[in-house]
Image (tube, helix red, strand yellow):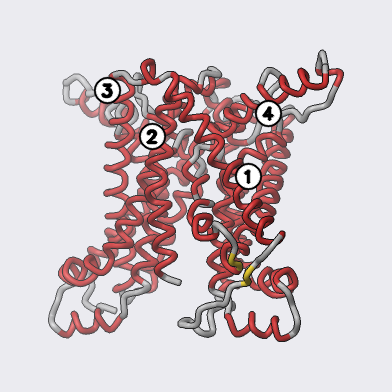
Amino acid sequence: MILGLSKRWSLTGYFIALVITLPLVAILIQAMLPDESVFDHLFDTVLPTYISNTILLMFWVCLGAILIATPAAWLVAKCHFPGRSIFQWALLLPLAMPAYVVAYVYTDLLDYAGPIQSALRGFFGWGSPQDYYFPEVRSLGGASMMLAFVLFPYIYLLARTAFMEQSSSLQHATRVMGCGPWQSFWRFSLPMARPALAVGVALVAMETAADFATVSYFAVPTLTTAVYDTWLGYGSLSAAAKLSAIMLLVVFTMIGFERFARRKQQLFQKQSGAELCELYSLKGIKSLLATGYCTLLLLVSFLLPFIILLNYAWQYFDESWHIEFLAFSFNSFYIAAIVSVISVTLGILLMFISRVSPRKADLLPSRLSSTGYALPGTVLAIGILVPLTYLDFAVNDLYEYLGQQGPGLIFTGSVFVLIFAFCIRFSAIAIGSVENSYKRISPSLDMAAITMGLKPSLLLWRVHLPLLRKGVFAGMLLVFIECMKELPAALLLRPVGFENLATYVFQFVSDEQLEHGALAAIVIVLVGLVPLIYLNRSLEQQK
């Protein structure tokens, strides 16, 4: 601890936290305002449906994700079978695929006019839907399946890490007791990994609650779509804020569950960090089943949609490659780059203050600043527009008071609002990445620097930053890809005439013409692969 840390550092931390939590405060205040009975009307008619659909969607997505991710994580972490080295990183790839793109691809394949049902009708001679039963894709179940395919890597990554960190001596003990691979998994590995699984399920639940594009495309009314429709359809910002407050209650419940599970996870640690865990060698039919399961999971969740996107992009390349596509790509890249730099800078400042300050109260800013990621995009948009609209009016009123023409909507009518929103939403990712890197820096280095007379700013610049570079780079990559994929906030906050790749692709998805936006979707996916591969390599180096 640096006893001489000035109050300016503390005030800086609290100012950052105040700005990041401003949308949350704005939502709560706006929710208390009258809404001309719009919310009462929603409460009496469709609100129970919105809430029940949201809860059911979260339940089915979490159940599906944990059922498909846990076996794959255990196989990759504990067993040796053909293709294991590839599946270690390849099963992370679905995170790079936007869920609404996967939804469109499978709707096109599985719908009544799609190739699968057409082939079945031709083969069996069926003439109409009354002659056979086929599950409805555009439904709550279909949306749950699509989201589970995209979000299961959250659980896979955490479960795989937990399985790899389990003590090899305990695994040897299970073998002495005569347990085979299945008994070892069921009686030992799975119970020990439950805290990690709980954290993964909480993350999947939060992402599901925040999803807008997939449920909107499948016409499944949830709280996310309710906020969007209430704001733009009814024109009631207060009613939308009340719905947002309900969503926040659901999301923060998930966060509390995650924190509780993470606290329990501290009980399960390696007993021998340098000891490598001996893998189960699968042979014969077991080996084929393991390879087949992981291959099928990768094919369904990533390879098949990506191949179809490549086919669309190739067929419609001449129509897709134009100056507007390049402009939209530039919009996505430069906003993502700016937000990445700002978010990581804020993360460094907040974690530095938390590390070196002797005051326990200075730990609060970094914790408060991590709440931004919990705000779904539609909710965040409301929380952003409320204070920035007042600020725009205040600036223009000041110009009018001085007898000059106001500048107009300089905050809500420019890309500033997008950059501001993305920084608030994704600063938590940068904070987490920097925090993990700080845990690897010995406090003795700080003491040595203090002894040499370094001031806090020099300590940060000369000692901490060189040691934080990997965490900073990882945080920038993760924030960059999240900015590229973020859709709800971009749809609601973008200035008039502004498009980025995410809104451009969703426009074609909504019009049932993804083939024209396939090239843009591929760019989003390819950019997303970089941090995922880097994340996997970092995980492999830490084993």
The reply to whether the C-beta atoms of the residues labelled 2 and 1 are less than 8 Å apart is no
Badge number at residue 297: none
Residue type, mark 4 in image: Leu
Q: Is residue 239 above or below residue 166?
A: above
Q: Residues within 10 Å of mark 4 (few under 14, many from 20)?
A: some
Tag 3 secondary structure: loop
64 left or right, relative to 123: left
- Count neighbours of disc 2 (C-alpha within 10 A) and say few if under 14, some if 14 to 19, many if 20 or more: few
Residue 249 can be seen, yes or no: no
> For the residue labelled by badge 2, is the local secondary structure a helix, a strand or a loop?
helix
- Camera-side mark, 3 or 2: 2
Q: Which structural element holds mark 1?
A: helix
Residue 148, label in figure = 1
Foreground of the two, 292 or 215: 292
Residue 408, numbered label: 3
The vertical placement of 542 against 518, above or below, is: below
